[in-house]
Image (spheres, rainbow, N blue to C red):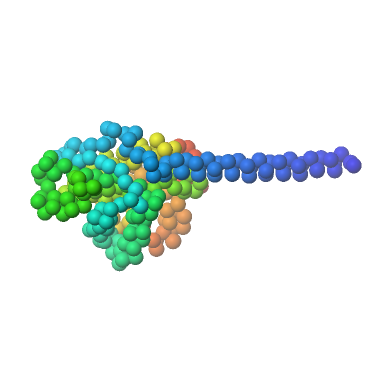
Amino acid sequence: MSGLGVTMMESKKLVYRNKKMKRKEILEKKKEIYEIIKAASSPHKDHLASFPAFRHYQRNGLSVYLESGCGDKLSSPVKQYIQNLLKANMEGPYGSEWPIAEKVKRREMVAPGARYIFVLEDPNANQATTSVETERASTYGINGRAPIVGFVQYRFTVEEEIPVLYVYELQLGPHVQRKGLGKFLMQLIELIAHKNQMGAVVLTVQKENLLAMNFYMSKLRYTISTVSPSRVDPLMGLEKSYEILCKAFDHEAKAILEESE
């Protein structure tokens, strides 16, 4: 066999080995991501336990504390509270899309992978709360204890081969809004994401919800993600009513989820 033939065979073998190694690396990376998501999503894991300083929030006339929850373990009164608060806060921004969106949110609410941080109020400490608000919120206390006044719903998932914490909902009752509580909760969410090896926090915001867009982009420095419709295809983005925002924590996540090609 000529030297050229040997060289070509060796070259083909090298290409084959490289492809095989690359496939192996891809499979190993996917397995690693799967294990990260599985560990973070464990129903036995209380994500608040790692951050005791965030168990309570006592500022701006508020005194509330936080508890964890799971979507498939919600009581009927808590489900009703979530549905009522979602309707009160989101029917306006969604407009004509709300009836369909509400059905989707009801399914998401009770999904096994859904994780919650509930905000519970000490009615004796918050004298500014009206009696009507206290009576309404008290109906939906967790296990008959303090009334719920808000919640964060999130999941651990994968976006573009990056493990992320996806915030499905951040909803607060009217009397606990504009008191720094939303920022406090998002700081906690980012710490939970870091702790569980997520590459980013991702969330969806309705374009019509200008207060939310300003809160995330101006106050918390989130950016419109590369996976948002407006960046995938500007023409398609014009037809969509939402943006996908993110805050990435490492170089790989930034390159894929934040930076343009």
| Picture residue at 35% right of the left edge, 37% below the top | 191
* Residue furthest to the front: 143
Residue 42, x across and y down, in percent: 41, 43
**Residue 101, visible in the rendered structure:** no
Q: Quadrant of residue 126?
A: top left
| Picture residue at 44% right of the left edge, 48% below the top | 157
Comparing 102 with 12, the one in front is 102
Residue 67, x across and y down, in percent: 27, 42
| Picture residue at 29% right of the left edge, 33% below the top | 52
Give the number of marks.
0
Q: Quadrant of residue 2?
A: top right
101 above or below 216?
A: below
| Picture residue at 80% right of the left edge, 43% below the top | 9
Instruction: Tell me if 249 is positioned left or right of 135 in this view.
Output: right
Instruction: Tell me if 29 is positioned left or right of 239 in this view.
Output: right
Residue 169, x across and y down, in percent: 32, 51
Residue 176, x across and y down, in percent: 19, 46
Comparing 164 with 105, the one in front is 105
Instruction: Tell me if 46 is positioned left or right of 28 in this view.
Output: left
**Residue 261, visible in the rendered structure:** yes
- Quadrant location, the N terminus: top right
